[in-house]
Image (cartoon, rainbow, N blue to C red):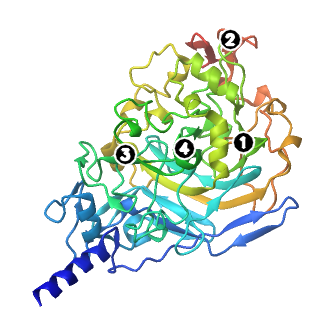
Amino acid sequence: MLVSSLVFSVSLAALSLGQQVGNYTSESHPRLSWQTCTRGGSCSTNSNGAVALDANWRWTHITGNYTNCYTGNTWNTTVCTSNAQCASQCAVEGANYQQTYGITTSGNALTLKFVTRGENTNIGSRVYLMASESKYQMFNVLNKEFTFDVDVSKLPCGLNGALYFVQMDEDGGMAKYSGNKAGAKYGTGYCDSQCPRDIKYINGEANSEGWTASPNDTNAGLGGFGTCCGEMDIWEANSISSAYTPHPCSTTNDGGQQRCTGQECNTPDRYGGLCDPDGCDFNAYRMGDRTYYGPGMTVDTNKKMTVVTQFITDNNSTTVIPHASTNFPGLLDPFDSITEKFCDDGKRAFNDATSFQKHGGLAHMGRSLARGHVLVLSIWDDHTAKMLWLDSSYPVDADPNVPRNRSWEPALPTLGNRRTSEANSPDAQVIFSNHQVWRHRPALTLAPPSHFPNPLSLPATPRQLEVTPPRPPPAPPPLFLRRLPPPLAQLKPSSVQCGGVGYSGPTQCAAGTTCTAINQFYSQCV
């Protein structure tokens, strides 16, 4: 009898080994419709689309018990002390999307709130577009267009409303890792080019061994493992700044998800790991166009806008991404696209690390996208760099004479502080809507980027354009979406360049303004 009981107990342990699912809150994914469209302009609505919350935000507790396995920013060592033990004894729970996490949908619109106060206070969120109850929607966007509307009018600097693609597994790793009992339904399997180590479960196991609580984030910490994969940032933005960035990874399956440890996770050498952490970014303000994006500017962030990204390939190996033009005469050509030459010249001009090139550049990014990516939508603040890389001077000790390091204003480096952001921006939110995938017209018939004097746009691994006001669905975008700059007389007096190294345009300023040197490369009427 004793032997039988022992065998029975061992069998139970074997069956429960792995990441478990709770049963206190049923998981009901909020519906989010999206469309696929043809060249001729007809669109088909995917009304069964939905979003799933990332597992990292979910309540983790003892299976069949209300005791927390993870509280604040630490694992409960009285419950489990190893990755395998925590996975076998702990479960991730279903989510109350609106009440707990501030996530709501209405038709084709998704609203993500930054701070949600209830029984506990939730900060930020990350969700994935679903194809079914248990699988993520996979996108192969090469030679297609991806469009969406976005409203960042209530998203101040220091915060980030992001829309991007990552090479996650379709089922969240459930088939690949037998320990993963939760899968895509519960938002498992996340990875990106930063090889994040703050993920609580990776490859069906807990990440509790070696976990260190964050000194400045009451909800997060770092474990012994990270999770890496290729990442294409279509939109990282707030109402002040925006950027788009391809990040290739030298992981399995041309950038597929891979667990890392030690130096593989870019630690301690930031550029010695499996992925390119910096990417080849294009931020219009940092690239010298100071009047392109922001409240009341060419792309007016007080209004909702439509972002159109054309994923143009050349023999399925190179991706081209147009944007506002660089404005560093004598230092860089006037690039309005992310090309291999832009990336090479930019890294050289700004003395940046060449990690992007090391990991295969745009050619590798194209191969990664061809494998299929998951769409991620999130709102977050940055505990490590305070989002300074997006909307301020970064690194903080950067040479101020390098033009791309200049800040919006001297006080900005203090605005990314987490506590300040939460206290000052309790109503911050981002709204993404009207997501569409178009069968793109043949890429090689498109005019080269130089045919767009000042394309009102943004990026992608192709050609990305922004339009205000938003394009009404489901009308197809024109072949060349562009917006010419307003006549000089209509420009604000303070928005006119008047000098700088290599500049050959007008040097006269309107009455009441003076030509003021911002740095050696750029002078502006102020």
Q: Which residue is mark 3?
A: 421
Q: Which residue is mark 1?
A: 462
> Residue drawn at (51%, 35%), measured in percent from left and top?
276
The picture quadrant where one finds residue 457 is: top right
Q: Nearer the viewer, mark 3 or mark 4?
A: 4
Q: Amino acid at mark 3?
A: Ser
Hey, what amino acid is under mark 1? Pro
Residue receiving disc 2: 330
- Mark closer to the observer (2, 1): 1
Residue 275: horizontal and vertical position, in percent?
49, 38
Relative image position of residue 133 (x, y in whole percent): 53, 75
Q: Residue at x 40, y 35 (%)?
A: 266
Q: Earlier in the sequence, mark 1 or mark 3?
A: 3
Q: Residue at x 27, y 58 (%)?
A: 83
User: Sequence order check: which comes first, mark 3 or mark 4?
Assistant: 4
Judged from the image, the secondary structure of the residue bearing numbered disc 3 is helix
Where's the N terminus, which quadrant? bottom left
Task: Residue 323: name its quadrant.
Answer: top right
